[in-house]
Image (cartoon, rainbow, N blue to C red):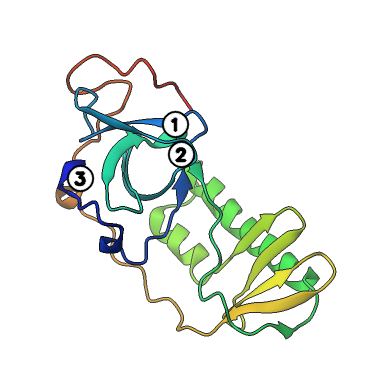
Amino acid sequence: MNAAAFPTDATSVPGFLPTHVVPQGGLSTWAAPDASIPTEPLDPLLPVQLLTRRGDWGQVLCSNGWAAWVDARLLVALPQSPPAAGAPLARTADARRLLAHVEESLGRYRKAVEELAEGHMDGETFRNATHGLRIGAVVEGEAVWLYDAEHDRWCYCDGTAMTTFAAHGPAPQSLPPEPTPSSLPPEPTRLDTPASGPPPTQLGDA
């Protein structure tokens, strides 16, 4: 999609939510996932929203509505708040029980993944083994957000006490069926093997 097709009025992008920032050295851009169609570079530390990925390529949206393709490997991810944030804080138990539950559930999932990768488990058995698992944990220094699947809520802990950070919301619905081969997108073009034109010498492996 050509970046020039996007409007430049900031009000045309309501609810813009940055997911990444541009690295300190700035970032080259292209009008399409094709290294032969360069456009204006992005300024250092500019907040952007990653819209889609195609191999190493990523299409980003700026707050003013301008979009372009970049080397997504160079984007710096921003930590995202847990869903439904902003609910009133309420005192709850300490975090140790939830931490133990996260460890146990993650261990079950890791074991199933290992058995699947080693060929000791087929896809259907893997789905049955992981059915019902719901794990959520975000750690940032001394702060941790833990998902309490039993009560369908997120809890915040600073290491000494835990409070309810976000609650309510229906349980997630069943996952959609896996795409059939006929519905899969075409093989993406990698930045190190562009479809046309010389490779972008300013880009390096992340």
Residue 101 image-quadrant placement: bottom right
Q: Nearer the viewer, residue 188 or 2?
A: 2
**Disc 1: which residue:** 26
Q: Residue at the location (49% across, 28% down)? A: 25
Would you name the residue on which mark 3 appears?
185
At which x and y percent is residue 116?
48, 48
Q: Are marks 1 and 2 in contact (CB under 8 Å)?
A: yes
Seen from the viewer's position, the closer of residues 73 and 129 is 73
Q: Nearer the viewer, mark 3 or mark 1?
A: 1
Percent across and percent down for residue 117 are: 49, 43
Q: Residue furthest right?
A: 160
Checking the image for residue 71, the label placed there is: none
Task: Provide the secondary structure element on which disc 1 rests.
Answer: loop
Amino acid of disc 2: Val
Using the numbered discs, state the Cα–Cα distance from disc 3 to disc 1 in whole angstroms. Answer: 30 Å
Q: Secondary structure at mark 2?
A: loop
Q: Residue at x 78, y 65 (%)?
A: 158
Q: Nearer the viewer, residue 112 or 31?
A: 31
**In the picture provided, is 150 more to the left or to the right than 1?**
right
Q: Position of residue 17 (x, y in %)?
A: 42, 60
The nearer-to-camera label among 3 and 2 is 2
Q: Amino acid at mark 3?
A: Pro
Q: Which residue is mark 2?
A: 22
Residue at 40%, 31% in the rendered image? 27
The three-letter code of the residue at mark 1 reads Gly
Label total for image? 3
Looking at the image, is 150 positioned above or below residue 5? below
